[in-house]
Image: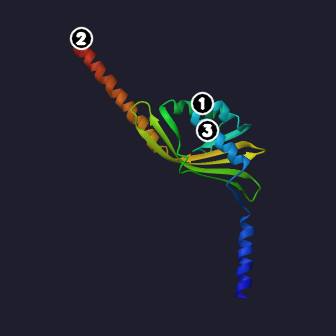
Amino acid sequence: MKKLIYLILVVITITACNQRHYMESSEIDSFKAVLAAYQSGDLDAWKGHFADTAKIYHNSIDGISVEENIKAQQEMISNFSSYGFDQENDYMEMVIDGEDETWVYYWAEWNGTLKANGKTLIVPVHLAVQYVNGEAVEEYGYWDNTSINNAFEEIAAEKAAAEAAAENTEEEVKE
């Protein structure tokens, strides 16, 4: 009787989850192409993997368009001499959830080297991308921006200090 109850519980647990996980799929291949395009700076190729109506939610509950995200990405990556994901230690899977939605989940470390001072930043990132008919329709990205914001503030403070020192030097020369 105990074995029968255990078997029933196992069957209920398996069927209740109703999620299917995959390590290989066309959606994963598409996502890998998205990563390659991003890392090479080819944001037009990156854009090609998204539906025209796709929404992107990066550390926000307010979605933006693919075009708005491209502008934000260009502004951000312009501060770095190199950037990308550590793909040696990343993890990616496709999940078809209980509502038959197809998602690719990605966990990795993003690395970037600042142009201004050569400092390397490492930021753990989680991305979740929903696919419909082979196109990304939603992307959710979550990471802690603290180290990036602190680095930008440090650069701004150094620049302000250098400008103030230059002004003081010019005033001393005039006197």
Residue 37 pos. (x, y %): 62, 36
Mark 2, mark 1: which one is toward the viewer? 1
Along the line of sight, the residue nearer the viewer: 41 or 116: 41
For label 2, the residue is 174
Along the line of sight, the residue nearer the viewer: 172 or 30: 30
- Quarter occupied by the N terminus: bottom right
Residue 7 pos. (x, y %): 73, 79
Identify the mark nearer the N-term, 2 or 1: 1
Identity, as a three-letter code, of the amino acid under mark 2: Lys
In this view, the residue farthest toward the left is: 175
Residue 154 pos. (x, y %): 38, 35
For label 3, the residue is 36
Q: Residue at x 44, y 43 (%)?
A: 147
- Quarter occupied by the C terminus: top left
Residue 93 pos. (x, y %): 65, 53
Gap between marks 2 and 3 measured at Cα = 54 Å
Identity, as a three-letter code, of the amino acid under mark 1: Lys
Q: Residue at x 44, y 30 (%)?
A: 115
Label 1: which secondary element: helix
For label 1, the residue is 71
Relative to residue 71, is residue 171 drawn left or right? left
